[in-house]
Image (cartoon, coloured by chain):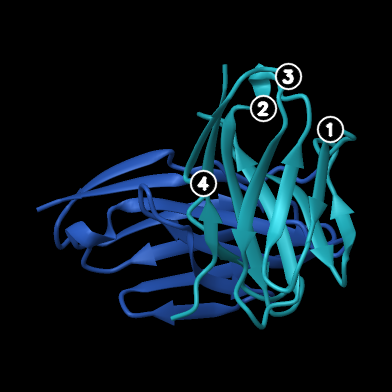
């Protein structure tokens, strides 16, 4: 059973601040790492899928990096806006199958 | 933009009853999944489904649970003889391919067992 952990659990920032949070996962038998953005009462929205060590992906002000050797991924948000307020989930897949194992999420709140 | 839909949004049932949660995946997707989140806990994988059969299931997915794709569009999760601890948010997801592909999630069905 994979153990995926995210930190911090929650984060309050001011509008305009840049922020980042961490996802750690077992590096053995790693296949892919997914990031999701989940707003209350909505569907989790896929942000990134990363597979290769050193991968960096970007979507607007949000970017992510991946280190498969040490088992961590960072998600960065540049110039946070109130609409970025959401829970950010990461999930890992190992090469034994296709099930996502989720971390507990980081709840981001951006104050105007 | 295509999306995964789920019905109902909230289901209340009595302990011991059977419930069926319904999902309509994105139409050209081939892989289907159910996850659940018990309040305050992590999202947990239940089952994946491909080519009309279960491709993977977790320890949670025991004989109490079953999945079906009864027609070309619906994907259902049946929970027999519900227990209090089955109360959770149940999410359906679909993907075009497996593993490295994004999974698109529905908004969830909140199941409350009383």
Circle 1 residue: B64
Distance Cα–Cα, label 2 vs label 1: 10 Å
Label 2 near label 3: C-beta < 8 Å?
no
Question: On the image, which quarter does residue B13 sit in?
Answer: top right
Circle 4 chain: B
Circle 2 residue = B86
Q: Closer to us: mark 2 or mark 4? A: 4
Left or right of residue B38, residue B10 in this image: left
- Distance in Å between CA atoms under marks 1 and 3: 11 Å
- Mark 3 or mark 2, whichever is nearer to me: 3
Task: Tell whether A59 sits left or right of A12.
Answer: right
The residue at 61%/73% (across/down) is B102
- N-terminal-most mark, 3 or 4: 4
Q: Name the chain under label 2.
A: B
Indicate which label's residue lies in the foreground, 4 or 1. Answer: 4
Answer above or below: position of A101 versus B80: below
- Residue A91, relative to residue B103: is it above or below? above
Asked whether A73 or B67 is in front, the reply is B67
Dot 4: element? loop
Q: On screen, B93 above or below B47? A: below
Q: Are marks 2 and 1 in contact (CB under 8 Å)?
A: yes
Q: Earlier in the sequence, mark 2 or mark 1?
A: 1
- Left of B90 or right of it: where is A84? left
Q: Are marks 2 and 1 on the same chain?
A: yes
Cα separation, mark 3 vs mark 2, equals 11 Å
Q: Are marks 3 and 4 in contact (CB under 8 Å)?
A: no
* Residue under pointer 3: B16
**Label 2 secondary element:** helix
Residue in the picture at 66% in, 68% down: B94
Chain letter behind tag 1 = B
Q: Position of residue A26 (x, y in %)?
A: 74, 51
Q: Which residue is mark 4?
A: B8
């Amino acid at each position: 059973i994979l153990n995926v952990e995210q930190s911090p659990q929650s984060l309050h920032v001011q509008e305009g601040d840049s922020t980042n949070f961490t996802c750690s996962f077992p590096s053995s038998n790693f296949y892919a790492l997914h990031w999701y953005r989940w707003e209350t009462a909505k569907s989790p929205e896929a942000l990134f899928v990363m597979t290769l060590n050193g991968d960096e992906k970007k979507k607007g002000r949000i970017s992510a990096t991946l280190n498969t050797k040490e088992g961590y991924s960072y998600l960065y948000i540049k110039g946070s806006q109130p609409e970025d307020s959401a829970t950010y989930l990461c999930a890992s897949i190992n090469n034994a199958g296709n099930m996502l194992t989720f971390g507990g999420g980081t709840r981001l709140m951006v104050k105007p | 933009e295509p999306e995964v839909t789920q019905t109902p949004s909230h289901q209340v049932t009595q302990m011991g009853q059977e419930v069926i949660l319904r999902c309509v995946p994105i139409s050209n997707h081939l892989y289907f999944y159910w996850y659940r989140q018990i309040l305050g806990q992590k999202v947990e994988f239940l089952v994946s489904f491909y080519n009309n059969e279960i491709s993977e299931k977790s320890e949670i997915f025991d004989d109490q649970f079953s999945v079906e794709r009864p027609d070309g569009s619906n994907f259902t999760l049946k929970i027999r003889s519900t227990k209090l601890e089955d109360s959770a948010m149940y999410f359906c997801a679909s993907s075009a391919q497996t593993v490295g592909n994004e999974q698109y999630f529905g908004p969830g069905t909140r199941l409350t067992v009383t």
